[in-house]
Amino acid sequence: MPEILEVEIYRRLAERGMGRTIGKVRMVDARYGRGGTTPRRLSGALVGHSFTEARRRGKLMLLDSDGGPTLGIRFGMTGGLVVDGEEALDRLIYGPGVFDEKWVRARITFADGGHLALHDPRRFGSLELAPDESRLGPDALTVSLAELTGAMAASPGKVAGSAPLKARLLDQARLAGIGNLLADEILWRAGLDPERRSPLYDAELRVLHKAVRATLRQLGRRGGSHMGDLMEERRVGGRCPLDGTELSRATVGGRTTFWCPAHQR
């Protein structure tokens, strides 16, 4: 599934589309638009312009244009990017593992004949003109300890009963970019219980911050969010790679979660 690491790979591929005049835009399914973005509005805003920069904020990819609005692309669970026929990734963990034209939800054709296409079998992604970037928290790849401390604090106005720790990690308004697989890997490495609701101590926040930064760097080098040390055992009956304890499984923050009851507290 596309998390921050996969979207960063998409962003790098999208750089090949910079500076090329847009000749045609087709959004196959009008329901793929978000925030009032319709096929007609999308085409009218981009045709004749060119993209000037490919950026990313968490899991949101942003394509700035020369005089037109920024195009925001969300990839959902199975969205992928194709530029001039080249896919950014061969496979996503919850994707079908094959490319099929019927799953292309939008295609931007450049005047030189090349194209940038969004391929999304399960259609959980979206396109949006001028998305509100301010609704996202600090980017997980560059988050500071102070920013992470603020992100993990209790919800405003609440002294106790904050959301579970994993739910806070997944909240894109608190911290942008962390998805289900990365959250489990980070908390497993940090030795923190995903169901924990009490505030973290300063020492625990430092450990969590180190785990966030180290996990993203290491898995980025390995090739994606699915390359974690916990991944092979992240299943019913799986055992902790550190101590052999059978992993616990529950729904936390609305997502299936695996953790070690022995060392994650």
Image (cartoon, rainbow, N blue to C red):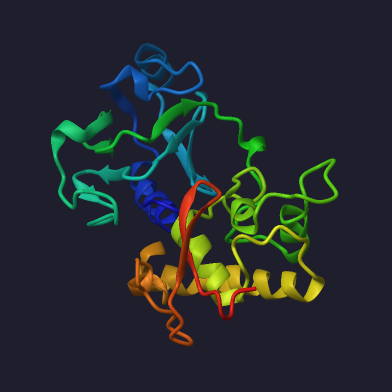
Q: Is residue 4 visible?
A: no
153 to the left or right of 63 = right
Residue in the foreground of this view, choosing between 198 and 226:
198
Give the residue displayed 48% in from the left and 87% down from the top.
243
Residue reaching furthest to the bottom: 243
Please provide percent x and percent y for residue 52: 47, 38
Give the residue displayed 30% in from the left and 45% down from the top.
80
247 to the left or right of 118 = right
* Residue 201 vertical position relative to residue 4 in the rendered view, above or below: below
* Residue 38 vertical position relative to residue 139 in the rendered view, above or below: above
Q: Is residue 92 visible?
A: yes
Please provide percent x and percent y for residue 145: 74, 65
* Quadrant of the image containing the C terminus: bottom right
Give the residue displayed 28% in from the left and 54% down from the top.
92
Q: Residue 26's image quarter?
A: top left
255 to the left or right of 190 = left
Please provide percent x and percent y for residue 22: 33, 27
Please provide percent x and percent y for residue 124: 36, 35
